[in-house]
Amino acid sequence: MPSTNQVTLNAPLDMHLHLRDGEMLENIASSSARTFSGAIIMPNLVPPVSSKEEVIAYKARIKEAIGAEDFTPYMTLFFKPTYDKAFLSSVRDEITAIKLYPAGITTNSEGGVSGFNVEELRPALEAMAELDIPLCVHGETNGFVMDREAEFVSIYEKLAGAFPKLKIIMEHITTKASVAALDRFENLYATITIHHLLITLDDVAGGMLKPHLFCKPIAKRPEDRDALLKVALAAHPKVMFGSDSAPHPKHAKEACGCAAGVFTAPVALQLLTELFEEHNAPLDKLQAFVSGNAQKIYSITPLSKQVVLEKKPFKIPSDYNGVVPMYADEKIAYSIKEVING
Ligand code: NCD
Ligand code: ZN
């Protein structure tokens, strides 16, 4: 993208978002709803969203928190191997995807999957494939922290091979091993965050420890970030933007025992625009990465929303209602000029 004063993005989509619940939901919902046309909403509440009633009630609470903004919450359920075809058929119209967490791997994932036995998972995953419900996966083993995602690639391959009709989304990929897996299986797709395109482990722990950059999966090596940049900047048709914006209260981040998650929702589009410009990537690739690819992969038609960004320095606030964003107090190159709904 050549240097430009103004960029307009159509119907930006965030394909991996934590909106939380209660007071946190009230405090941060507008950060996404103002500038995104819609988002895939993660189900890792306490307790996790795992019944039809819970998904309907959570969606209603989100709608109330976003008020008059044009914003579609694309709902998900927390995967359980016990889901059967009758249950999945009954809930099909309420959800866009189902999210699978390995047990205990990240925030509120204790009720997730252990062992990844194909036969145990078969009834639920075959029913999902038949009903065309994509499976979003947090792909980490409980091995050494830098190797967890690369070790999980063999599980992705096992699932992708055993369930060729199931769309599997590798969430928030951080390694060149995951990027390489994309092209080996037709049914594997991926989301990529803005923070994993910008930082490596050095930014998190190479100098003073930066708790607001600590997340799961942890940021990796320069060569991993390069592999992510390559597919994101080219808008590889199987990758899409998913912020994994994961707010925690300031006291839970600036603590002995820091919660995992980077809060990027209010600054994601500005940072993405700056990144694409810096790398001279064409605007149509940015548009595909933040919306077009996701529309095709998920077969969705988002609400119309035009976000106009201008090249004008923006000083990121030190917090949004008590939640510290990525790059708090720093200056970035782009600001949101206006948002045109409808
Ligand atoms: C997420 C959260 O806090 O819910 N944390 C994170 O570090 N990304 C969970 C997740 O997506 O792993
Ligand atoms: Zn997440």
Image (cartoon, rainbow, N blue to C red):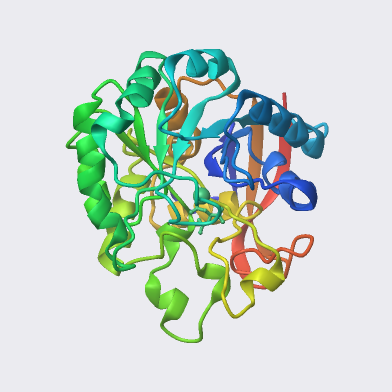
Q: From the image, which quarter does the C terminus lie in?
A: top right
32 versus 311 height, above or below: above
Q: As drawn, is 23 to the left or to the right of 258?
A: right
**Can the viewer see residue 199 in this picture?**
yes
Residue in the image at 34% along x and 54% along y: 140
Residue in the image at 81% along x and 34% along y: 64
Closest to the observer: 191 or 274? 191
Tell how many labels: 0
Closest to the observer: 146 or 302? 146
Residue in the image at 73% along x and 51% along y: 28
Residue 270 image offset from top left, x and y in percent: 59, 53
Closest to the observer: 340 or 105? 105
286 versus 162 height, above or below: below
**Can the viewer see residue 303 in this picture?**
no
Residue 230 image offset from top left, x and y in percent: 29, 51
Residue 274 image offset from top left, x and y in percent: 51, 56
Residue in the image at 78% along x and 47% along y: 22
